Image: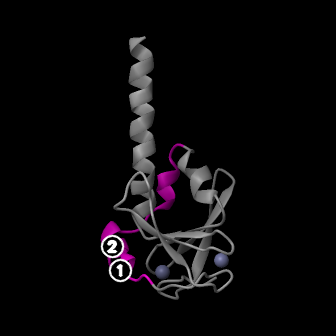
Amino acid sequence: MKCPKCQTDMEKIEYEEVTVDRCLGCKGLWFDMLEHEKLKGIPGSEIIDSGDPETGRKYNEIDEVNCPVCRARMIRMVDKDQPHIWYESCGVCYGVFFDAGEFTDYKEKTILDYFKGFVAKERR
Ligand SMILES: [Zn+2]
Ligand SMILES: [Zn+2]
């Protein structure tokens, strides 16, 4: 599979039995339907997001991309909880693409919420 942003080959990486594709060039991440949601809930999964956020920001500017799986034009999405995170989603196969650094960012809120919940429980 080729990266939808820089057309470099993508490698398969696995974390806790979830397989995602990572670009060998820009290190963007491709998730099949709901895989990003699944991985978001697994502690330590941000390790797959090994790219440089600076590079990610550059590729984030590219907003006309086609789905690497079914070639459909992807839709630019904004994360509802963290509006600074823009990612691309395919309306046909529901795959999503995160630029380098975005998945870590996307996960961060969950980690914070987890600690907030933990503190709340301790006080009871
Ligand atoms: Zn790439
Ligand atoms: Zn697709």
Asked whether, in this view, residue 101 is left or right of residue 21, the answer is left
Identify whether 81 is placed above or below 66.
above
Label 1 with label 2: CB-CB less than 8 Å: yes
Q: Residue at x 43, y 71 (%)?
A: 99
Q: Quadrant of ligand 2?
A: bottom right
Q: Dot 1 corresponds to which residue?
A: 61
Q: Give the x, y percent position of residue 84.
A: 34, 61
The quadrant where residue 69 appears: bottom right
Q: Give the x, y percent position of residue 37.
A: 58, 53
SS assignment at label 1: loop
Query: What is the three-letter code of the residue carrying label 2?
Result: Arg
The quadrant where residue 115 appears: top left
Q: Quadrant of the C terminus?
A: top left
> Is 84 in the magenta?
no
> Is 55 in the magenta?
yes
Identify whether 1 is placed above or below 43.
below
Coloring scheme of the render? one colour
The number of callouts visible is 2
Q: Dot 2 corresponds to which residue?
A: 57
Query: What is the three-letter code of the residue carrying label 1?
Result: Glu
Q: Give the x, y percent position of residue 4.
A: 53, 83
> Which numbered disc covers residue 112?
none
Q: Quadrant of the N terminus?
A: bottom right
Q: Residue at x 40, y 48 (%)?
A: 108
- Highlighted range, magenta: 43-63
- Mark 1 or mark 2: which is in front? 1
Label 2 neighbour load within 10 Å: few <14, some 14-19, many 20+: some
The quadrant where residue 61 appears: bottom left
Identify whether 22 is placed above or below 121.
below
SS assignment at label 2: helix
